[in-house]
Image (cartoon, helix red, strand yellow):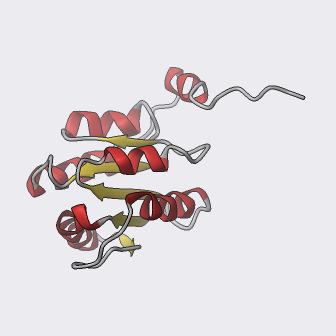
Amino acid sequence: MRIALGSDHGGVQLKAAIVEHLTARGFDVDDVGVAPGEAADYPDIAHVVAERVLAGEAARGVLICGTGQGMAMAANAHPGLRAAVVADTFSARMATEHNDAKVLCMGERVIGVGLALACVDAWLDAEFEGGRHARRVAKIEPRRQER
């Protein structure tokens, strides 16, 4: 499975740990940046990861910034994509099982490395349950009025 991963300068250390962890688990990691010492605006990175997931170039995406919030807001601006901010394994698992979130967002200033890696594992190892959850997920996209 290919996973697109990105961070701004506020999440570069946690991103590096996740890249190493995912690679060790056998995932194909597409690191879209940034490198240590580089500055970046979080929306720029979030848009690259979101576009790669939506285009099918990556099955899932992981975004890291200081809190995870900005990355999630930028990724969720893409119709058809769901990004979830998590800081615990239960929420990470539910983001997949109940919400079919294809992008996981975390904050380097919020979560420690060990817990972040556990969240990534919980999110990746879970499967979307469908059923009543599919009906609810379908309601997330705004209704388009016909003209």
Instruction: Identify whether 136 is placed above or below 12.
Output: above
| Residue 1 appearing in the image | no
> Residue 20, position in %: x, y?
21, 73
> Residue 130, position in %: x, y?
51, 30
Specify the quadrant that holds the N terminus: bottom left
Residue drawn 28% across the image and 56% down it: 65
Is residue 2 or residue 129 the one in the foreground? 2
> Residue 105, position in %: x, y?
33, 49
Is residue 10 or residue 139 the one in the foreground? 10
Residue drawn 39% across the image and 39% down it: 96
> Residue 19, position in %: x, y?
26, 70
Q: From this viewpoint, which residue is outermost toward the right?
A: 147
24 left or right of 126? left
Is residue 93 or residue 87 the one in the foreground? 87
Specify the quadrant that holds the C terminus: top right
Residue drawn 45% across the image and 38% down it: 128
